């Protein structure tokens, strides 16, 4: 036979139940699933937050110019034999596969070879992949500071003639959400499908 609760026991039971409910709410919020990405999730990273660079038209651009779009930023150079054209070709395919959301993607190409990559050269280079892709041309001083901020590598490799040099450089892409926040580090060679998937997630959750 069970004994009925006293008034004090009943009040204590109700109080404990209320406390449990109050604790459960923030716990549920803390355990909400984070978006899952194919690239390396670097959300909250304290670097590569912004830039101030001239585009091929001489207009100074910053991350704020592209608010409302997912941004993929890549360092390269026009005479790059393989990595750069492969990446830009893939990004053109990514934009196409995003369908209607393709207009919400902005690809930025920062040259690590500002001596040869003049505005005319970069306009033609971007046009070969997608005229909406934006080339950014830093001065040598800006490039040095930017490389430190973005933690990227570049180095001139001498060729047979003074003008036939090549550039070693980092080959990953930095991906920002439509609010301009750095979110992903996409390694070279991952392919089109993973980037499409990650951008769809960013556009949906941002």
Image (cartoon, rainbow, N blue to C red):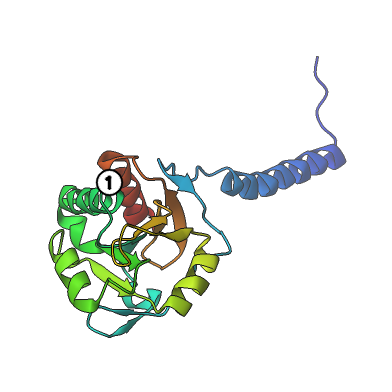
- Can residue 158 be seen here? The reply is yes
- Residue at the far front in the pictured view: 160
Front residue of this view, candidates 111 and 11: 111
Residue at image coords 28%, 55%: 80
Q: Where the N terminus falls, by quadrant? A: top right
SS state under label 1: helix
Q: Quadrant of residue 113?
A: bottom left
Q: Quarter-wise, where is residue 119 in the image?
A: bottom left
Residue farthest along the top direction in this orientation: 1
Question: In this picture, is 22 found above or below 133?
Answer: above
- Circle 1 crowding by C-alpha within 10 Å: few under 14, some 14–19, many from 20: many
Between 122 and 183, the one lying in front of the other is 122
Q: Position of residue 206 (x, y in %)?
A: 39, 59
Question: Which residue is labeled 1 in the image?
Answer: 196
Point out residue 12 in the picture as x, y percentages from the top left corner: 82, 42
Left or right, 104 with respect to 169, comes to left
């Amino acid at each position: 036979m069970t004994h009925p609760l006293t008034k004090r026991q009943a009040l204590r039971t109700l109080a404990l139940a209320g406390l449990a409910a109050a604790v459960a709410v923030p716990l549920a919020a803390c355990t909400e699933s984070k978006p899952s990405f194919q690239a390396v999730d670097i959300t909250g990273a304290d670097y590569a937050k912004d830039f101030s660079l001239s585009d091929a038209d001489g207009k100074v651009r910053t991350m704020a110019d592209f608010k409302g779009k997912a941004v993929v930023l890549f360092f390269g150079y026009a005479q790059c034999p393989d990595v750069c054209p492969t990446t830009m070709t893939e990004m053109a395919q990514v934009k196409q596969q995003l369908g209607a959301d393709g207009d919400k993607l902005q690809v930025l190409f920062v040259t690590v070879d500002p001596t040869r990559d003049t505005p005319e050269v970069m306009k033609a280079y971007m046009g070969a992949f997608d005229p909406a892709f934006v080339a950014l041309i830093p001065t040598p001083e800006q490039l040095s500071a930017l490389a430190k901020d973005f933690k990227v590598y570049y180095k001139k490799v001498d060729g047979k003639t003074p003008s036939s040099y090549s550039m070693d450089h980092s080959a990953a892409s930095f991906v920002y959400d439509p609010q301009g926040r750095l979110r992903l580090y996409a390694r070279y060679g991952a392919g089109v499908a993973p980037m499409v998937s990650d951008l769809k997630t960013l556009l949906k959750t941002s």
